[in-house]
Image (tube, rainbow, N blue to C red):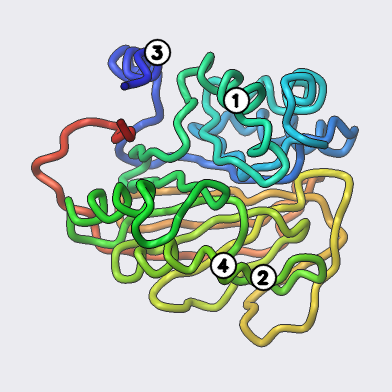
């Protein structure tokens, strides 16, 4: 069943621009209702982004009350441009919290795709089944088979690789990562309350942007990291254009913390003319 509100908004020209340039912000673990989280959200909103990717976690357990008291006061102002993925904190109460909140905004699906800035963005779900024969993996393989190229950005909650002192690597999400090899260029995650950029691996560069709130974690020394910062609230600002991306980690005060760039091969798919591909 298709999200009618979402399709209608895209037909009316209210969705994100399919071809660049486009400004995208990404942050997770910030729906705690704290003052610093609200400051970060205000900074993002002032940039008037074309899309905001919320990388998961509504505290403490993603109930309808938590969405009303913790998420809405922080990121509610960005609801019209927000494209979420579910975190471990809210997935257990998804039927009363996550799904009703996002369904009312035309974004209630557990995984989906969209186009923006000449890239294809894939919202995947590290909390739903993602093993080889799962519905999510079958959907992902179908999507990736539709068009050659690497101009794809995938985002989900728990990072495949992490130098964080609390969670570390998540080997169970390897099927998501492995499916993207040679078919995507960027992976964004949250969960670990730090800012991390990894060296390219399997043609993919992973960014952890989980420092959106008041509770921050530490980092271990890790040779896989190209950049890592603990103890600072911030988010990832991305400029997407066809074939290229610029990615800046910014602090809550707007300070540039890290800058990187990525290039990709355009995804060519003559059969797919729509802006979204939602699961049935």
Q: Are marks 3 and 1 in contact (CB under 8 Å)?
A: no
Quadrant housing the N terminus:
top left
Q: Which residue is mark 3?
A: 5
Residue at (89% x, 34% y) in the render: 34
Q: CA distance from mark 2 to mark 4?
A: 7 Å
Q: Quadrant of residue 16?
A: top left
Question: What crowding class fits label 3: few (fewer than 14 Cα within 10 Å), some (14-19), or many (20 or more)?
Answer: some
Which residue is at the front of the view, 179 or 276?
A: 179
**Residue 207 vs residue 126, the one in the foreground:** 126
Image-based side of 84 in relation to 235, left or right: left
Question: Which residue: 42% across, 48% down?
Answer: 240
Q: Is 102 or 154 nearer to us in this picture?
A: 102
**Dot 2: element:** loop
* Earlier-in-chain disc, 3 versus 1: 3
165 with respect to 244 (left or right): right
The residue at which mark 1 appears reads as 95
Residue 29 place in picture, x, y as percent: 74, 45
Distance of mark 2 from mark 3, alpha carbons?
36 Å
Secondary structure of the residue carrying tag 3 is helix
Which label number is shown at residue 162? Answer: 2
Quadrant of the rendered image containing residue 70: top right
Report if the CB atoms under discs 2 and 4 are less than 8 Å apart: yes
Q: Residue at x 39, y 19 (%)?
A: 6
Mark 1 or mark 4, whichever is nearer to me:
1
The secondary element bearing badge 4 is classed as loop
Which disc is residue 160 wearing?
4
Circle nearer the N terminus (1, 4): 1
């Amino acid at each position: 069943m298709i999200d009618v509100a979402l399709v209608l908004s895209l037909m009316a020209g209210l969705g994100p621009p399919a071809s660049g340039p486009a400004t995208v912000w990404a942050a997770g673990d910030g729906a705690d209702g704290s003052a610093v989280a609200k400051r970060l959200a205000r900074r993002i909103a002032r940039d008037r982004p074309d899309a905001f990717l919320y990388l998961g976690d509504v505290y403490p357990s993603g109930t309808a009350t938590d969405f009303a008291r913790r998420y809405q006061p922080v990121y509610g102002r960005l609801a019209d441009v927000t494209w979420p993925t579910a975190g471990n904190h809210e997935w257990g109460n998804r039927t009363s919290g996550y799904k009703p909140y996002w369904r009312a905004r035309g974004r209630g699906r557990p995984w989906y795709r969209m186009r923006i800035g000449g890239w294809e963005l894939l919202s995947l779900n590290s909390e739903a089944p993602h093993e080889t024969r799962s519905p999510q993996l079958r959907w992902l393989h179908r999507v990736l088979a539709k068009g050659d190229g690497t101009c794809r950005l995938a985002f989900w909650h728990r990072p495949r690789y992490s130098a964080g002192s609390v969670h570390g690597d998540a080997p169970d999400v390897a099927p998501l990562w492995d499916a993207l090899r040679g078919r995507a260029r960027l992976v964004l995650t949250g969960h670990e309350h730090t800012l991390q950029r990894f060296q390219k691996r399997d043609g993919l560069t992973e960014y952890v942007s989980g420092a959106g709130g008041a509770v921050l974690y530490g980092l271990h020394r890790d040779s896989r990291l190209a950049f890592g910062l603990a103890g600072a609230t911030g988010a990832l600002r991305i400029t997407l254009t066809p074939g290229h991306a610029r990615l800046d980690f910014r602090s809550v005060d707007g300070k540039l913390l890290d800058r990187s760039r990525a290039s990709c091969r355009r995804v060519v798919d003559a059969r797919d003319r729509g802006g979204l591909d939602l699961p049935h």
